[in-house]
């Protein structure tokens, strides 16, 4: 009976999140520097041509879809890293993974602009290199949470310095790179959105295949090994999937911090730690959070549009401090 009640509660929560996400998406489509009135929005959704049809199809709708993909990818990346590292403070942005991915992408953008198709792969290489550096610095301390975060901050700082040198040396080629680095969803085409989704699909499939292993990796290593699971292999594979999702997203939209930190915690509060349930809720909450952040970014000082990365930094910074203080208090206890 308890299991039935729990399942019903999860279905109600899922339905509520879907309705809320739908409402946010409608508002996100309607609001912006060029507002679309309700009557016109209904006409557009019905397939009619109106004065703002081009704005709707080529600007507003692609941005809304990209916000969904971005939220899903960054939220899943954070969840995978937190599970593998057993660290509630793990986040691609905080740990320097996003900075490494951005550096790899920037190198291609500035030095090899004709090779735009390999930007996601360059981003993955940069993100993975940053992740391996963090692991190397933290290995002797048995990947202690605070040590991991401090190593991530150090790596992040070094990479950011390298990024500054790169952008200074090639300032004549910057164009939209600076805005992109702040986390920007504007001006993306359907082709770019299709590219980031196509790159993301292999990681989605891998997560589905390894859902059961995520639950096992939540146990301590001795217990996981006793179940016959090659712990180190799966940790590396799942961590690589998390880094990959963060990297291919950064390659298109730039640096958007704290999504991977905030969303998994919200999802755990809603449904607990079973990854078979946690992953779908992380997807829903991630899409909702970034969609809300992007809507705020486009409307809070309209007609000026802020980068969504700026909004997420403002919202996520206090949450990170709260988690950091709670983690420190827990370690003392």
Image (cartoon, grey):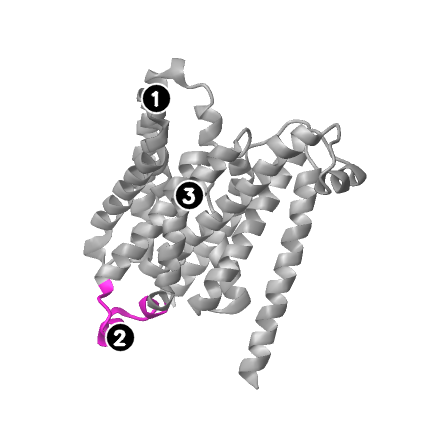
Secondary element at tag 1: helix
x 57%, y 37%: residue? 63
Q: Could you tell me how far apart the alpha carbons at marks 1 and 3 are, in whole angstroms?
A: 20 Å
Q: How many marks?
A: 3
Q: From what the image shows, is residue 100 above or below residue 205?
A: above
Local crowd size for mark 2, using a 10 Å CA cut-off: few (<14), some (14–19), many (≥20): some
Span highlighted in magenta in the image: 215-231
Q: Is residue 218 magenta?
A: yes
Q: Identify the image quadrant of residue 291.
A: top right
Around disc 1, counting alpha carbons within 10 Å, would you say few (fewer than 14), some (14 to 19), or many (20 or more)?
few
Q: Position of residue 196 (x, y in %)?
A: 43, 40
Q: Residues within 10 Å of mark 3 (few under 14, many from 20)?
A: few
Q: Which residue is mark 1?
A: 114
Does any portion of residue 50 appear in the rendered image?
Answer: yes
Where is residue 203 drawn, in percent x and y?
37, 51
Q: Position of residue 94 (x, y in %)?
A: 39, 45
At horizontal 38% and vertical 56% (from top left) the residue drawn is 205
Compute the Cα span from label 1 to label 2: 50 Å
Q: Which mark is residue 177?
A: none
- Element assignment for label 2: helix
Compare residues 248 and 222 and report the one nearer the observer: 248
């Amino acid at each position: 009976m308890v299991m039935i009640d729990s399942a019903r509660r999860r279905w109600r929560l899922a339905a509520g999140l879907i309705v809320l996400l739908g409402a946010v998406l409608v508002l996100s489509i309607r609001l912006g520097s060029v507002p679309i009135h309700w009557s016109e929005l209904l006409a557009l959704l019905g397939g009619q041509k109106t004065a703002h049809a081009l704005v709707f199809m080529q600007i507003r709708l692609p941005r809304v879809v990209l916000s969904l993909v971005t939220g899903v990818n960054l939220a899943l990346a954070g969840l995978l890293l937190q599970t593998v590292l057993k660290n509630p403070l793990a986040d691609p942005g905080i740990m320097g993974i996003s900075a490494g991915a951005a550096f790899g992408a920037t190198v291609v953008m500035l030095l090899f602009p004709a090779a735009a198709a390999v930007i996601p792969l360059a981003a993955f290489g940069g993100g993975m290199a940053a992740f391996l550096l963090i692991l190397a610095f933290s290995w002797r301390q048995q990947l202690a949470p605070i040590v991991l975060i401090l190593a991530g901050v150090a790596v992040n700082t070094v990479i950011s310095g390298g990024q500054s040198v790169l952008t200074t040396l090639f300032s004549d080629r910057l164009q939209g790179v600076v805005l992109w680095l702040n986390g920007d969803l504007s001006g993306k085409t359907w082709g770019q959105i299709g590219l980031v989704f196509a790159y993301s699909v292999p990681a989605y499939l891998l997560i589905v295949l390894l859902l059961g292993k995520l639950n096992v990796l939540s146990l301590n290593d001795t217990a996981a090994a006793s179940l016959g699971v090659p712990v180190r292999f799966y940790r590396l594979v799942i961590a690589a999937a998390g880094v990959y999702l963060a990297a291919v997203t950064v390659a298109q939209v730039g640096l958007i911090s704290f999504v991977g930190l905030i969303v998994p915690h919200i999802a755990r509060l809603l449904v607990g730690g079973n990854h078979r349930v946690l992953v779908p809720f992380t997807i829903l909450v991630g899409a909702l959070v970034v969609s809300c952040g992007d809507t705020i970014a486009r409307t809070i000082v309209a007609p000026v549009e802020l980068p969504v990365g700026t909004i997420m930094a403002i919202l996520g910074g206090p949450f990170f401090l709260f988690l950091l203080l709670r983690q420190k208090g827990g370690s003392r206890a």
